[in-house]
Amino acid sequence: MKRHRSLMTAGVTVLIALGAGQYMASGTAQSTAAMTPVPATATPAALRLAAATPLGGYEPRPAAPAVLLPAAATPDQTWSEPPAMQTDSGTEGCTAALDIFTGDEATLSVTLTAPCAANQTVVLRHAGLAVTYQTTASGALFADIPALDAEGVVTVRLPDGLELSGASPVPEVASLNRLVVQGIADDRFSLQTDLPRLALGEPVGPVPLLAEVATWPAGQTPSLAIEAGVNGATCGRELIGEVILSEAGQITRNDLTFAMPECDGEDGFVALNNPLPDMKLAATE
């Protein structure tokens, strides 16, 4: 496959694109995952093509495996988390401000006011999560995201390159686990589970960043699968994404690739079942 690269590389590309107003190719970026991941040579999880509803009615077919890829150990300073602080910035009469509040069920409420960034795409980041949103006609953004760590640091990048950071502590994450799967543009992944799920991000900007988050009480072992639809936009190529596991506020990150079946005119799903053991193993190595 031609597109075999880290989601972090593409994420940096998105930040460049939003700042410059065009999509630009970037070089290889290193992941900031603070872990030793599962080796890429390990036996991959089962891969199945669904013929009907998610997690049901699967028809076995030969297909290349979906795998959690190893993340590089050298941190990329472009994606290092900002200090926990609230920032007001901008020129006179055009001040941008970011406020972060802790909400119910261990969530972070984000309020951005940026009068000079009306109807613009911004990138919201938190603990490895990166999603795009569009501001209102007055340059405002109101979003709620599940907290992944106790520090609650959130950064918003505006189209002109300005970054605003804020934080609100979220001690409640100590009693929760969360799994995030995120992808770029057409490389969309979904979580299949009976757990509460939340879709994050909006399909806006030159390269939309979207994510799904599932939450469950710490100490439990839920049933989970990661899926990607087989269609004209995804068939015959490799999808890239990233998986983030928050265990009581401790973060583990790993790259994800799905090798999609060839374009034969049939729809369905490619599924990676039970990704949690690989993520937990990566966190302990």
Image: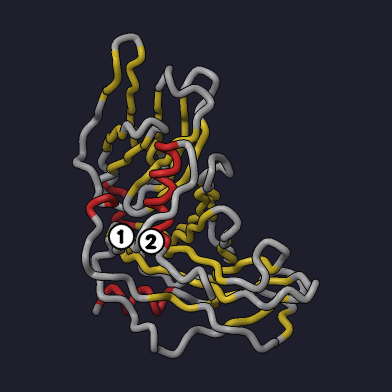
136 or 179, which lies in front? Answer: 136
Name the residue rendered at 52%, 33% in the picture: 134
In the rendered image, residue 137, in percent from the top left (x then y), is placed at 55, 20
User: Against 12, is 236 above or below?
Assistant: below
Task: Say which residue label 2 marks.
Answer: 177
In the rendered image, residue 37, in percent from the top left (x then y), is placed at 31, 76
Q: Tag on residue 248?
A: 1
Q: Can residue 223 be seen in this view?
A: no
Q: In this view, does 183 lie to the left or right of 51?
A: left
Q: Where is residue 159, by image quadrant?
A: top left
103 or 242, which lies in front? Answer: 242
Check if mark 2's residue and mark 1's residue have beta carbons within 8 Å.
yes
Q: How crowded is mark 2: few (under 14 residues within 10 Å), some or many (20 or more)?
A: many
In the rendered image, residue 209, in percent from the top left (x then y), is placed at 50, 49
Secondary structure state at the residue bearing disc 2: strand
In the image, what residue type sits under mark 2? Asn
Furthest residue in direction right, as rendered? 265
Furthest residue in direction top, as rendered? 93
In the image, what residue type sits under mark 1? Ala
Q: Is residue 208 left or right of residue 179?
A: right
Q: In this view, does 85 lie to the left or right of 41?
A: left
Secondary structure state at the residue bearing disc 1: loop
